[in-house]
Amino acid sequence: MTAESSIMMVSHGLYGTLWMLSCFGLFLSEDLQFSGPANGAVGGSVVFAPDNPPSTSINIVQWQFGSTLILIAQSDSTTIVPEYSDRVSFDINTLALELWNLRLNDSGIYRLTVVPSAGGQLTGETSLQVFEIITNVRLISPEESLIEGESSANISSEGTGSITSVQWMKDNSPLSPSNSIIFSSDNRSVSISPVQRSDSGEYQCTYRNPISSETATLSLIINYGPEEVSIKGEDVVDLGARVSLSCSANSKPAASFSWKINGTDTDVTTDTFIIDYTDFTHSGEYICTAWNSVTKRNATQKHALLVKGGGGGGGGLSSGAIAGIVIGVLVAVAGICGLTVYLIKTKKISKINLRQNGPARGAAQSRQEPDLNYADISHFQKASGERVNLGNKSEFSTEYADVKHGGKSRAPPPPYGSQVRK
Ligand SMILES: *[C@@H]1O[C@H](CO)[C@@H](O)[C@H](O)[C@H]1NC(C)=O
Ligand SMILES: *[C@@H]1O[C@H](CO)[C@@H](O)[C@H](O)[C@H]1NC(C)=O
Ligand SMILES: *[C@@H]1O[C@H](CO)[C@@H](O)[C@H](O)[C@H]1NC(C)=O
Ligand SMILES: *[C@@H]1O[C@H](CO)[C@@H](O)[C@H](O)[C@H]1NC(C)=O
Ligand SMILES: *[C@@H]1O[C@H](CO)[C@@H](O)[C@H](O)[C@H]1NC(C)=O
């Protein structure tokens, strides 16, 4: 296969067939081998160098692009054609051709022909594909709000550069076609119809070519609900209790809430309905309505509240009421006891005061209450004119008996005694 016939074939072929041709070239056992086709970026550079340059001395070297001559070199001189003179260099030792300031139409077959001094001809060819670097990739989101089960979403992509593939991911996993997810034939847009809440997420679209890639991302929000409205809170409470009913719903965006009682609107527009202090009129049916302003849907839930109390429901006393009564009784009993003790003390002391001397009274008051009675007795005894020794209890008991006896015999019982015993 001669260089000329090869060039003729290339000139007939389109870029799509370049690969085949270069394969043919290898199949026909080209003498000069190149390691694979090359890729270049517009404005960039590329070097074509044979893997097996001849070791013998060389007479003529020729580089061609398709049918166009780029350069002819001999051992002592290199001639570059004017079209390439400002963007080509050549190394006679390695036979490498460097081409810079690449343009898209530099894509094609490059052919090297070597004529050794010994005669004959060695040929080899390689191919170059020049790409524009991919830039400005972006995704265009649907303009309107997307509602689950109703809306369709078309996500389309844009970008500049030579695009050889477009790949889509959702939340870092490949996005696959399905009944509701359809890709355009060039993969540059995807249509989801109808959208489901599971379609919410981050979409990534990557434009690629062999020399560059760029990814754009887009967050898709699918609105839904409200649904699963529920009310948490008390259903039976005692009179006076605090009640807090809390309404929730599954909704995107978050639902807003309103409340009705017995079918009548209230002005409560929060998720929680609070009654600080219940009375019987607070019993009734509480209805929470959750409203999604994007889906324009609402959903409700009902909750029955019963306020009960002593006598009101006829169901007997509540534990609170019983506790109240018990406490009241205890307080009353304690009060009576206290009054009794007080009366006993004051009557005795006042009585004693009439009979005792100053110093003895002071000593009595400094004692503790139980002792006070004994002291009173001692004073009483003193008043009766008898001797008492309080340091000995058994002795005192005897004396006390005597006193009582003596009291009986010498003085009438104090008038207060019968009053207190009543
Ligand atoms: C290749 O493209 C450049 C512009 O990028 C143009 O000036 C040149 O004439 C083109 N060459 C051929 C052979 O078409
Ligand atoms: C989505 O794209 C398809 C064509 O691929 C078109 O028929 C449809 O109207 C588009 N839908 C929206 C919501 O833009
Ligand atoms: C579109 O993408 C799918 C998978 O992501 C791929 O199999 C297919 O070849 C692509 N089609 C085009 C025209 O890029
Ligand atoms: C709701 O209705 C019940 C029974 O008809 C009534 O007892 C209750 O007081 C009502 N509640 C309110 C808050 O109006
Ligand atoms: C709920 O929706 C119904 C119709 O679906 C409407 O009549 C009603 O007013 C709505 N309620 C609220 C609170 O938006």
Image (spheres, rainbow, N blue to C red):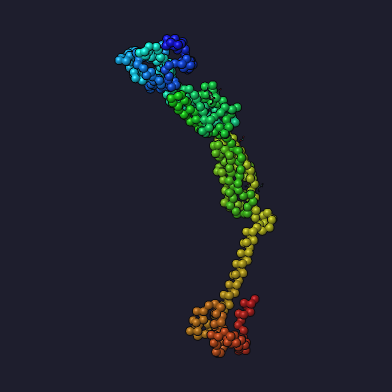
Q: Is residue 142 left or right of residue 261?
A: left
Q: In this rendering, does residue 88 appear at all?
A: no
Residue 10, how many percent across, how many down?
45, 12
Q: Is residue 303 left or right of residue 18?
A: right
Residue pictured at 43% horizontal, 10% vertical: 2
- Of 247 and 188, nearer the camera is 188
Residue pictured at 40% horizontal, 12% vertical: 121
Residue pictured at 60% horizontal, 71% vertical: 336
Q: Is residue 173 left or right of residue 312?
A: left
Residue 283, how many percent across, how many down?
64, 49
Picture layout, residue 226 above or below residue 207: below
Picture layout, residue 134 above or below residue 303: above
Residue 269, how many percent across, how many down?
55, 42
Based on the displayed image, in which of its 4 quarters is residue 118 positioned?
Answer: top left
Based on the displayed image, in which of its 4 quarters is residue 98 positioned?
Answer: top left
Residue 275, how many percent across, how many down?
58, 49
